[in-house]
Amino acid sequence: MSTQSKKRPAEQSANEPVPKKRARKRAEDQDDDSIEEIEEDTTYHITATMHSRFNVYPSALRTKLENTYKTTIRAPMATLTFGIAETFKYTYTIVSERSVHQPDHATGPNITICKDNIPSLCIANTALLELFTKSHKVALVKPSFVFLRKQDGMANPEFVRLHSVRHNEIGWGLDANECLSLHFVFIEKGKKNEYNIYVRQTMVKKERDE
């Protein structure tokens, strides 16, 4: 009795590139490709990596903050390289809000100014993460993050107040000014609590020349 060997699929040449499937990026994972294009006329590349203690947060969030750091670092480099004067047009404030839902009504929000007069967006956004990490350690043990989609022209606090997440979920997003927002819902003493912490942008007033 004769046996027939099964044909193997043709082996791919070692020199032939293996086609790679490009995964379609979700809205929250899309980066600003123009950032690298800015560096085409320079003699250096600027890189920024968030500290490992922030690895608990979504990679898409960390990437956006890293890009903000690179943009901020380019300003003084442009001053040194091209003689472009660096000016600060905005300051930033970190604000927290907490509301407690009673059986028949809700109290709050209790608004707290956490930090103000911050001159840099990247520093303000990172400081917000520092504050949330310290005050909500339990929520970050096994966190469930939800992306809060940006709304055209809507800035904080209206942006963060627009959204709602489920119990024990942490919503994150950037408003129209790229200011970070976190929205967290949790149960404490049998009552629903809503906690918002966000960065708010303020225009710097220029003094008139006498």
Image: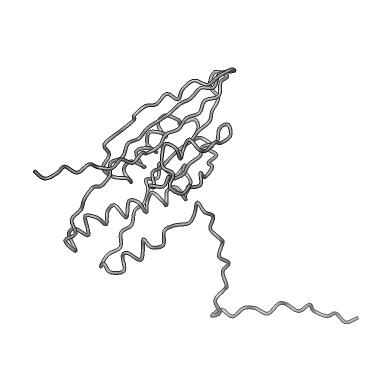
Q: In this view, does 48 lie to the left or right of 28?
A: left
Q: Which of 194 and 39 is in front in this view?
A: 194
Q: Which residue is drawn at 48% across and 41% down?
A: 172
| Residue 123 sits in quarter | top left
In the depicted structure, whether residue 48 falls above or below residue 114: below
Q: In this view, does 71 lie to the left or right of 31?
A: left
| Residue 6 sits in quarter | bottom right
Q: Nearer the viewer, residue 8 or 87?
A: 87
Q: In this view, does 48 lie to the left or right of 13?
A: left
Q: Where is residue 187 in the image (x, y as percent from the top left)?
A: 55, 24
Q: In this view, does 139 lie to the left or right of 36?
A: right
Colour scheme shown: one colour
Q: Which of 1 and 76 is in front in this view?
A: 76
Q: In which quarter of the image is the N terminus?
A: bottom right
In the depicted structure, whether residue 17 falls above or below residue 61: below
Q: Quadrant of the C terminus?
A: top left
Q: Position of residue 95 (x, y in %)?
A: 37, 32
Q: Which residue lies furthest to the left in this view?
A: 210
In the depicted structure, whether residue 195 falls above or below residue 145: above
Q: Which residue is drawn at 52% across and 45% down?
A: 147
